[in-house]
Image (cartoon, rainbow, N blue to C red):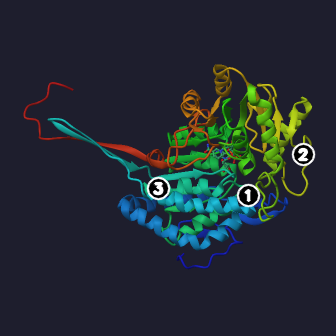
Amino acid sequence: MSPSSTIQWDKFHNIIDGKQRGSDNIHHGVDPTTGQNLWAVPIGSEKDLDDAVKAAKKAFPAWRDTPIEKRKETLINFCNFLSQYNDDLTTLLCKETGKPRKDAADEVAGITRFLYYHCSLEIPTDKYEDDEKTIYTEYTPLGVCAGIVPWNFPLTLSVGKICPALLTGNAIIIKPSPFTPYTGLKFVELMQGFFPPGLVQAVGGNNELGAQMCEHPGIAKISFTGSIATGKKVMETASKTLKRVTLELGGNDATIILPDVDIKKVAPQVVIGAFQNSGQVCVATKRVYIHESIYKEFLAEMVNFTKTIKVGNPDDGDNLLGPVQNSMQYEKVKGIFNDSKTKGYKFAVGEPDISFSKGFFIKPTIIDNPPDDSRIVAEEPFGPIVPTLPWSNLDEVIARANDTHMGLGACVWGKDVERAMKVARRIEAGSVWVNSFEKPTPLAPFGGHKESGIGAEWGKTGLLSFMNAHVFHVYKSEPTKPSSKL
Ligand code: NAD
């Protein structure tokens, strides 16, 4: 396929060994704004996966041996070519996720930033020298990698695996989520004009295909983003062949509001942190702990701002939020609404009764001071509903924030930045934001503590997660006499 081939935005294929491939077995994504089926996509078979692994193995050695500067140049050339399709990709992303056009455009624009930033990074090396030897530490690619992607940021999270894998000299096979297969498949199709056949491939399919990837002896690494429950299965299956795994999993981010914050400025920001992408962000704010001295006023400001948030279709004017992405997630969030209603918790804003109509829309909702062991506090809802909780003692609130098996992100807000930092250091989470809601960036490693993940992706750390350390111990001369030491 040449870079100038016509791109069809309503036809979707698996991409195996540089070619488009269909399947007898198809499924459809669903438009979350209407509940209607979208275009047909092939479900990859075990044979498709085997063929992809064979093609990747063939493509790998030459790419591994291509100088990194050349690899970077190819990625940048592809990135420049891609910009002509930004609008098409944005429209497709809106269709499959239902997110507001502005957010989808931002996700697409983020690809360029991500690729350029990663292409500015160097793979580190290290050298130790003494009188008898020099030890060189270098890093070499793993071989054939697989990326398994969820549905909340289908494009960002695909690119976040493809780009570091290729940059470091690997081949990669991507499996998009069956809920959002379209942008992932199209993105890999667009790459084909720039990369040798088999180097970057996409096999769409269901959860079983994901499990087959974890089992496949020809795959060296699984880069997985998704739920904790699936992450555990991935690790278990991948352990049979001792594959490398990076697991980017769920979270239950606590936000701690210190008593000295500027309430009017901070409360709307905290609301955005909780409801961004309709709460379907691994590091969305999921519990808001507000100092008791300002609890009422802070909650009132959160409620006022939440009431101004418009929810609707991607192109309906100035909507801040779209629907929940799929019916499975909608039902899960509905379960948390029902639980909160049944237990008699106070809805500060939002409606207890959500019912499925045409699309999976839910109004942003705040639950006022539910118990610490309630579902809305203890679980990750992954939807537009968040609890607020008063606190009075700093040690006690830090203990409550840490009282979870998850540890992905957290926020601390306070005018005294040094004091806020002291609190931040005591939070058990991979990323803690001080005076900001959660804004993931490739400028730093992104990963979770506890059950929120293993390893980290993006940035320099992310590059090394696609490599093996390769160490050379070079002695300066041959030994003059046999060594008595081992
Ligand atoms: P999921 O775990 O249900 O699915 C994720 C992917 O795994 C899909 O492609 C799915 O087909 C595949 N899969 C399912 N079963 C599998 C198996 N047994 N073996 C291998 N692959 C399998 O997650 P989801 O519902 O798509 O995503 C939502 C979750 O992802 C939330 O918990 C969210 O917090 C988390 N998430 C984490 C991050 C992060 O970077 N930490 C980012 C986004 C989302």
Task: Check disc 2: other Cα within 10 Å, few if <14, some if 14-19, many if 20+.
Answer: some
Q: Point out which mark residue 118 bears.
A: 3
> Residue flagged by tag 3: what amino acid is it?
His
Query: Who comes first in sequence, dot 2 or dot 3?
Result: 3
User: What's the CA distance linking mark 3 and mark 1?
Assistant: 26 Å
Q: Tell me which residue sits at (53%, 72%) in the image.
A: 81
Horizontal placement of 481 versus 336: left or right?
left
As drawn, the residue found furthest toward the left would be 480
Q: Quadrant of residue 369?
A: top right
Queried on whether the Cβ of the residue with tag 2 lies below 8 angstroms from ligand 1, the answer reads no
Please indicate whether residue 230 sits to the left or right of residue 56 in the image.
right
Is mark 3 in CB contact (under 8 Å) with mark 1?
Answer: no
Q: Residue under circle 2?
A: 354
Closest to the observer: 56 or 288? 288
Residue 43 in view of the camera: no
Q: Please name the residue shown 75% across and 30% down the image.
A: 294
Point 62% across, 42% down: residue: 436
